[in-house]
Image: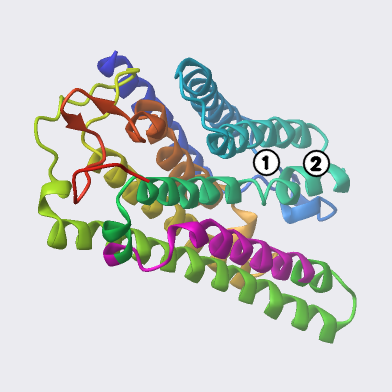
Amino acid sequence: MAHLANSVILTILLGFVAAADAGNGTITGGDQTFSFIPGGFVPKKIPAYIALVAYGISGLIHWIQFFAFPSRRPFMLALTIGMTAMTAGFVVRILFSMAPENAIGKFIAMDLVRPFPCLFLATDYMLLSRLARSFDKEVVGRCLLIRESRIVKIFVWSDVTTFLLQTIGGSSGAGHSPSAAKLGNTLGLAGLVLQAFSFLLFTVVLLTFGWRVSKHFPDLWIPRNARPFKLFSRQSIDNWRVVYYTMCVTCIGVLIRSVFRVAEFAGGYSGTIATHEGYFYFFDALPLWLAMSLYCFLWPVRAFGVRSGEIELIGSAHKGPRR
């Protein structure tokens, strides 16, 4: 199973790399370029099909994990729905490539799917909150920079606010007035920068939590008598650090995508990055897919609030009843 998974991942990676080297998809006829194409280029079908298959497979595995594991946590729907929505987005992208002059199709394929990755960010917010709640109050109080009950509220509202800025900026930037366009571009870029900075702060909160647990509660950092971790299993995870490290890796993928979005918007609608979709696949679709597909191998719910004999999956600083 592991060899098969590695082969599939390698094939998809090669496909994304090929897409990144493919250049843009602007339609040309002889020496003429069809400037009426919304967005300035026509999405290529092959990389879109590769992304469709990649996100589709990962989404299917997420749904299987969600229904197969006895403890179905509703908050994990953010991940499953997000992956499904991204899959649907690539379906629309393929359809748009068949009718590139359709402005509505371009809006749906390129713009309407922009909010869906926010569901991936929300997944990590909720995972950290649940992970922290499975520790005693003393551990949470000393190791978490923000109260676990406020993590989701603070960062989700931050994403909502920054996305509204991007939306307002995009609408204003599409206007005919130069002053309105300039203001719109400024607002849109500010929204993207603030969103990237917000997730960077979350990453700092996550890393600080792990570092403080290892420093102040070494017995919790390295669980005793932990069973070996198994991929694609319903067995509970004894070592909570497996989930923690996975979350850290997903943060890298999200941050890469965030920096790319800032660079893309800063370059303008007719810039090199915006009109060459290879950049989109390599620095947006690929990092997100790699990050969120990690949860195919490790369903985080396996490490939450479960006991097995003398092994406590999330340790406690003191013996006795837990919250």
Dot 2, how many residues are within 10 Å of its Cα: few (below 14), some (14-19), or many (20+)?
A: many
Please check the rendered image and state whether residue 166 is part of the magenta-colored stretch, yes or no.
yes
Residue toward you, 275 or 150: 150
| Residue at position x 58%, y 39% in the image | 78
Q: Is residue 267 visible?
A: no
Which badge, 2 or 1, is on the more N-terminal residue? 1
Residue at 53 percent across and 28 percent down: it is 50
Name the spot of residue 42 as percent of width and height, x first.
71, 43
- Element class at badge 1: loop
Q: Main SS of the magenta segment?
A: helix
Label number found at residue 100: 2
Question: Is residue 14 covered in magenta?
Answer: no
164 over 131 or under it: above or below: below
Q: Name the residue under label 1.
A: 43
Residue lying farthest to the front in this orientation: 320
Left or right of 97 in this view: 228? left
Q: Where is residue 303 in the image (x, y as percent from the top left)?
A: 32, 33
Q: Position of residue 323 (x, y in %)?
A: 38, 46
Q: Quadrant of residue 211?
A: bottom left
Residue occupying the point 79% across, 44% down: 108
Q: Which residues are drawn in magenta?
A: 142-168
Asked whether disc 2 touches disc 1, contact meaning CB atoms under 8 Å apart, the reply is: yes
Amino acid type at circle 1 is Pro
